[in-house]
Image: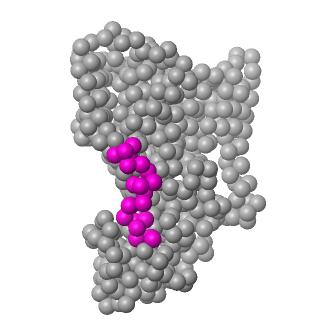
């Protein structure tokens, strides 16, 4: 089969189409991940004209909320818009994965790398529209610019600009910011042989400062610069320090790669299968050759992946969707390990992967096309509960949400507890300590919320895993004495005060 000519408009168009086919079916489900639900709630607040954290609060950096909120302002506040943001982010990342691989290998392998990344992004744990899906577009763009334009002063400036955007989308990429800064300061990536090295460092720093300065300026002119600092520095540091150790978290990230390859052999299996097939002979000799050489483009890409892993290890508790941050680099490594001449077993794997991808994504994709997003959203469980609350409540009726925070999105209102858009935040001491100390919320938020006996309480049918004794006992006693379940939809129960 003759592949299309490798130009960026062609690649982007094909990757957008492939991302659409593999991800559009996700709109058949209202909730894919409760972190995504939190992002949608914050984006809805931005779409209505609020800066992130001002009306509603979460610990993540602001750019993802601004991007998704901007999309909602243009295309409408809906789950479809939110998933569309993730879809476009995956396609742009796949574009740069393809272009980067083309610098290291043949055109066929470059196409394979882009497709492998989209395969990986189609696995269920990484289907939601998360910070990773947008962050990676900026990150891979910065890698490509660093390689393609490293002898240009404007290129170095653009690297700083892009990696700053990536970090404003996901904080753990600060390690990559530092790594690139060291590279540029070392002289390996000076703009050209006659230009002073310090000019490259200056260009990189200025490029990085502009996005950060623009966001800071938005908060400053609205009198909320302290809130921006507290959220993105004080709370982040306290939260990361109160979780798993760097070593344990880093090991878990590495172990998750073979686990994902076994759990999703059609989507992630190539990340182990292709390199193992290449290096099966003389394993130790080949491992020695895998030590990154920063003077080569492949070595720089591998070292960037290591810097991302370091950021993941430092960021606290590892969860499965975090692993998507390594998928572009794994896709490049897997594709580069393929020989330039075709082999039969590669074609067999491609067939297995395509069949697996079709089985996983085509049924829901077909439903989404036939039924339509508007009809699907009309029957979403939490949206139905929100419609019931709108019909029953008065202006002063409070809603305590302990799961299913998308209800804030449909009701277009902030939560009872300022820092608990994400429900588990209501009992997380490493978050509450900072926001209380900084005067953003009163102490004992959970206890006071329960004691106020709000008219509605939204709960999951299953026990709340994050709520331990004695708090769980206090909640259940209140529900038993003063509330009755009035509505059950999907996995959720709405309790109403007697």
Q: How many marks?
A: 0
In the rendered structure, the answer to whether residue 41 lies left or right of residue 155 reads left
In the rendered structure, the answer to whether residue 333 lies left or right of residue 193 reads left
Residue at position x 38%, y 74% from top?
Answer: 458
Comparing 432 with 384, the one in front is 384
Q: Check the picture and name the quadrant holding the C terminus.
A: bottom left
Residue at position x 72%, y 38% from top?
Answer: 206
Residue at position x 60%, y 21% from top?
Answer: 148
Q: Is residue 258 above or below residue 286?
A: below
Comparing 62 with 209, the one in front is 62
Q: Check the picture and name the quadrant holding the N terminus.
A: top left
Q: Is residue 374 magenta?
A: yes
Q: Quadrant of residue 24?
A: top left
Q: x, y percentage for residue 453?
A: 43, 87
Residue at position x 52%, y 83% from top?
Answer: 394
Residue closest to the far top: 341
**Main structural element of the magenta stretch: helix, strand or loop?**
helix
| Residue stretch rendered in magenta on the structure | 367-387
Q: x, y percentage for residue 319?
A: 36, 51
Q: Quadrant of residue 116?
A: top left
Q: Is residue 30 magenta?
A: no
Residue 156 seen in render: yes
Residue 296 seen in render: no
Comparing 132 with 461, the one in front is 461
In the rendered structure, the answer to whether residue 270 lies left or right of residue 208 reads left
Q: Is residue 462 above or below residue 314?
A: below
Q: x, y percentage for residue 374?
A: 45, 54
Q: Is residue 353 above or below residue 370?
A: above
């Amino acid at each position: 089969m003759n592949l299309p000519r490798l130009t960026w408009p062609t690649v982007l168009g094909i990757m957008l189409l492939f991302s659409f086919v593999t991800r559009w079916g996700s709109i058949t489900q209202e909730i894919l991940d409760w972190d995504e639900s939190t992002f949608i709630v914050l984006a809805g607040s931005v779409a209505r004209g609020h800066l992130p954290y001002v009306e509603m609060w979460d610990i993540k950096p602001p750019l993802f909320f601004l991007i998704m909120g901007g999309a909602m302002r243009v295309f409408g506040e809906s789950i479809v818009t939110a998933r569309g943001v993730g879809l476009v982010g995956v396609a742009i990342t796949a574009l740069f994965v393809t272009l980067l691989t083309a610098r290291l290998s043949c055109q066929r392998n470059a196409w394979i790398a882009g497709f492998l990344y989209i395969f990986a992004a189609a696995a269920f744990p990484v289907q939601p529209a998360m910070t990773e899906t947008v962050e990676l577009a900026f990150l891979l763009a910065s890698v490509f610019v660093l390689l393609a334009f490293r002898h240009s002063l404007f290129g170095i400036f653009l690297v700083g600009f892009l990696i700053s955007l990536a970090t404003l989308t996901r904080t753990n990429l600060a390690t990559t910011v530092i790594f690139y800064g060291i590279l540029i300061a070392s002289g390996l990536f000076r703009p050209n042989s006659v230009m002073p090295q310090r000019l490259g460092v200056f260009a990189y720093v200025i490029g990085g400062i502009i996005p950060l300065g623009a966001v800071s300026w938005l908060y400053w002119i609205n009198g909320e610069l302290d809130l921006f600092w507290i959220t993105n520095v004080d709370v982040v540091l306290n939260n990361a320090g109160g979780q798993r150790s760097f070593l344990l978290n880093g090991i878990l990230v590495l172990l998750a790669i073979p686990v994902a390859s076994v759990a999703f052999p059609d989507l992630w299996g190539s990340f182990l299968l292709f390199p193992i097939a290449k290096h099966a002979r003389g394993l130790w000799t080949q491992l020695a050759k895998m030590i990154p050489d920063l003077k080569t483009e492949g070595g720089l890409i591998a070292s960037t992946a290591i810097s991302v892993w370091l950021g993941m290890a430092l960021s606290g508790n590892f969860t499965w969707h975090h692993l998507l941050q390594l998928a572009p680099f794994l896709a490049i490594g897997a594709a580069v390990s393929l020989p330039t001449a075709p082999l039969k077993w590669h074609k067999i794997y491609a067939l297995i992967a395509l069949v697996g991808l079709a089985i996983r994504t085509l049924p829901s994709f077909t439903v989404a096309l036939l039924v339509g997003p508007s009809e699907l959203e009309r029957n979403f469980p939490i949206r139905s509960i929100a419609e019931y609350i709108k019909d029953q409540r008065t202006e002063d009726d409070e809603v305590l949400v302990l799961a299913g925070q998308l209800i804030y999105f449909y009701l277009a209102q902030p939560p009872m507890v300022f820092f608990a858009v994400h429900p588990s935040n209501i009992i997380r001491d490493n978050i509450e300590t900072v926001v209380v100390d900084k005067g953003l919320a009163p102490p004992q938020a959970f206890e006071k919320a329960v004691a106020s006996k709000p008219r509605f309480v939204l709960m999951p049918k299953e026990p709340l895993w994050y709520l331990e004794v004695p708090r769980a006992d206090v909640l259940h006693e209140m529900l038993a004495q003063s509330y009755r379940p009035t509505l059950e939809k999907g996995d959720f129960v709405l309790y109403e005060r007697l």
